[in-house]
Amino acid sequence: MTTRTTAQQREQARIAYDAYLATCPARQLLDRISDKWVSLLLTALADGPQRYSGLSRTIAGVSQKMLTQTLRTLERDGLISRSVTPSVPVRVDYSLTSLGVSLLPVMQAIKDWAETHIEQVAAARDTYDSRSTSPDAVAQSTERNEASRQIRRA
């Protein structure tokens, strides 16, 4: 029996995960961190701990329900911590854990990319939408559908 080091065991476990498989836990994690509220919350906490009300003001459009739900999920996943300070009124702060900090560069890069390229993406969408709704495009689509029907009948 061969003995493996802890590093070798971790590497073997890492190789065993395949996010392309529907049942892979890594896929579930990808689903979680790809949520828009998750990326916005993590980047909002990059500058340090914040209270619930501060996060609510920083992230425009998030409902109380979604903010609470997302904070709980991130805490459960170990990406943020919630600290309660007994005072009147009770003070609750949210901050990134070391695991959350390790994810931050990726989330910040995605946020920065979106802010930098939104105009190009919007232009591409406009081009696509105008192409797919122009009279010529509709006529070509109709012709293709008719040709397809004739082939199936033959």
Image: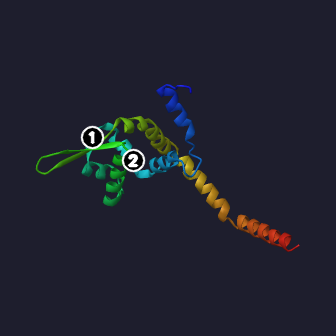
- What residue is shown at x 51% (from left), y 45% (from top)? 26
Q: Is residue 59 left or right of residue 123?
A: left
- How is the structure coloured here? rainbow
Residue 42 percent across, percent down from the top left: 37, 43
Q: Is residue 24 left or right of residue 55?
A: right
Residue nearer the viewer, 94 or 129: 94
* Residue lying furthest right: 154
Residue 151 percent across, percent down from the top left: 85, 69
Residue 56 percent across, percent down from the top left: 30, 53
Residue nearer the viewer, 108 or 18: 18
| 100 to 56, vertically: above or below | above
* Residue lying furthest bottom: 153
Quickly name the residue at label 1.
49
Location of residue 138 (image quadrant): bottom right
Residue nearer the viewer, 50 or 143: 50
The amino acid pointed to by label 2 is: Leu
Residue nearer the viewer, 94 or 7: 7
- What residue is shown at x 35% (from left), y 54% (from top)? 60
Residue 132 percent across, percent down from the top left: 66, 62
Q: Quadrant of the N terminus?
A: top right
Estimate how packed mark 2 is, as few (under 14), some (14 to 19) or many (20 or more) residues with alpha carbons within 10 Å: some
Q: CA distance from mark 1 to mark 2?
A: 14 Å
Residue 152: mark in rendering: none
Judging from the image, what secondary structure is the residue with disc 1 in? loop
| 133 to 121, vertically: above or below | below
- What residue is shown at x 50% (from left), y 47% (from top)? 25
The amino acid pointed to by label 1 is: Pro
Of pointers 1 and 2, the one earlier in the residue sequence: 2
* Residue lying furthest front: 1
| 122 to 50, vertically: above or below | below
Judging from the image, what secondary structure is the residue with disc 2 in? helix
Quickly name the residue at label 2.
40
